[in-house]
Image (spheres, grey):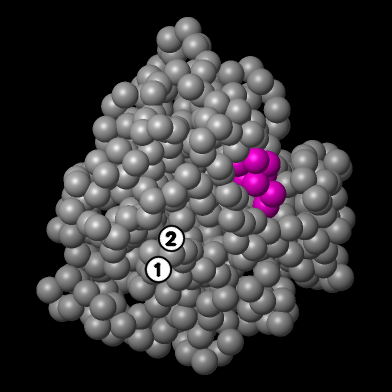
Amino acid sequence: MPHSTPAPLTHPNPSRRSFLIGASLASAAAALTACSGSSSKRSSSTLKIAYQKTSAFTQLEDLLTKAKDEFEAANSEVTIELVPIEAEQDQYFTKLALMNGSDSTAPDVMYEDSFQVRSDAAAGYLMPIDEYVEAWEDWDQFVDSAKEAGLGDDGKLYGVSMGTDTRGIYFNKQIFAQAGLPEDWQPTTWDEILDAARTIKTQVPDVIPLNIFVAKAGGEMTSMQGFEMLLSGTDSELLYNTDTQKWVTGSQGFIDSLAFMDTVYAEELGPSLDVALDSAIGNRVSTELLPQGKLAMAIDGSWMPGGWISGDNPWPEWEETMGFAMMPTQNGQGDGFTSMSGGWTLAVGSKCAIPDAAFQFISIALNYENTLKYDTENAQVAVRMDVAESEDYLSYNPSFEFFSSLVPYTHFRPTTPDYSQISGNIQIACESVVTDDATPEEAAATYDSGLVSIVGEDGTEAASK
């Protein structure tokens, strides 16, 4: 991640900029209506903040509760209403979309995955916030890639990044020792991952050797942490060619990635299907299977240690138990290793009647102090330069150094508005292979056909490799 030497820190006062709150609420709503051309905007002195919450993910609620108290202390005229959506990731997307579909339920501020910014902006759910960040002195602390994460197809900014993430392989050093595998294990090919899983199955038969997400119910976990972690390490690494703006069909890497998943399940190296196809599999990996020593390896994201350090499911022994390995490319080609990165934003809803107040809430939630709190507690790769270089950040979690080191190898999902539909097709392909409904070749062909039905023949191109 690029860093520059930050200017001396000046922690912003929540009320340092006038946001036209209180007596000017009506004029703010009127100004919004005038610039948007809409007459259906809500007029309210309450800001509804919609966000995800699960038993393993409470750090965001802690952050937003703190920001609510700070905001309301500075703005007695406006009340913050926190609206938690208690759901796993894919269900969260669905419920948030339903909320955005109605003027009466659309949130004023929402927790928005960066890959959905373009599609939700195009759908009219989000409000551009360029004028606000231009007047926000903290904006200069955000790295360029974080700023780009909130852009829509029209080049306008719709979200402020809360941090990013990377992905690698978690492995239980104690189980590895039982299996005769090294404590400093670092595979250099996919075959070495599979060989380690086979050794564990033989030597420590009462544990699950490897988890890679494969289910439709897993949603984006399956597409990103599972399939795209594999595809990005093949010779035909692209789902989408950004140069030609076309989606790729006929990819051997696509077939090979599905074949890896097929091998894991055909050889019973992964969880039983009732566990693997459960929508709560991500939560179970982090709160049950790894902490209880039931799982030897997991291809997963950088945020997991955050839940082990604090929250409802602490695991004090994780530091001495877990090792980290980089995800190798298929045959060690290219840079040798790969990762995937995403990240979430806070965005202002298009139906918000008091956008000045909404952005002030975001500016408080993502100031230095609160970003430091969130990025440490939720194990985020910091995108604020002042936080990334802070000793408080660097010393908080021993996994930060490893996961930050993956940034040079990382890849990002396509951010086109049709990615969500295509991601769903990837999930179907993965599940069909591990349940023996299709061979990798058949599943890839079905994916290609579905891809054409979504984007049209003109929106696709044949893979070059």
Q: CA distance from mark 2 to mark 1?
A: 6 Å
Q: Residue 255, can we see it?
A: no
Q: Is 260 rendered above or below residue 136? A: below
Q: Is 7 rendered above or below residue 23? A: above
Most common secondary structure along the magenta stretch: helix
Q: Quadrant of the C terminus?
A: bottom left
Q: Residue at x 51, y 85 (%)?
A: 432
Check residue 325 for magenta coloring: no
x and y, in percent, of residue 335 in the image: 41, 43
**Kind of residue at badge 2:** Ala
Viewed as shown, does residue 36 lie left or right of 212? Answer: left
Viewed as shown, does residue 420 lie left or right of 51? Answer: left
Q: Are the residues tagged 2 and 1 within 8 Å (C-beta)?
A: yes
Q: Which residue is mark 1?
A: 102
Q: Residue 138, can we see it?
A: yes
**Kind of residue at badge 1:** Ser
Q: Which residue is mark 2?
A: 106
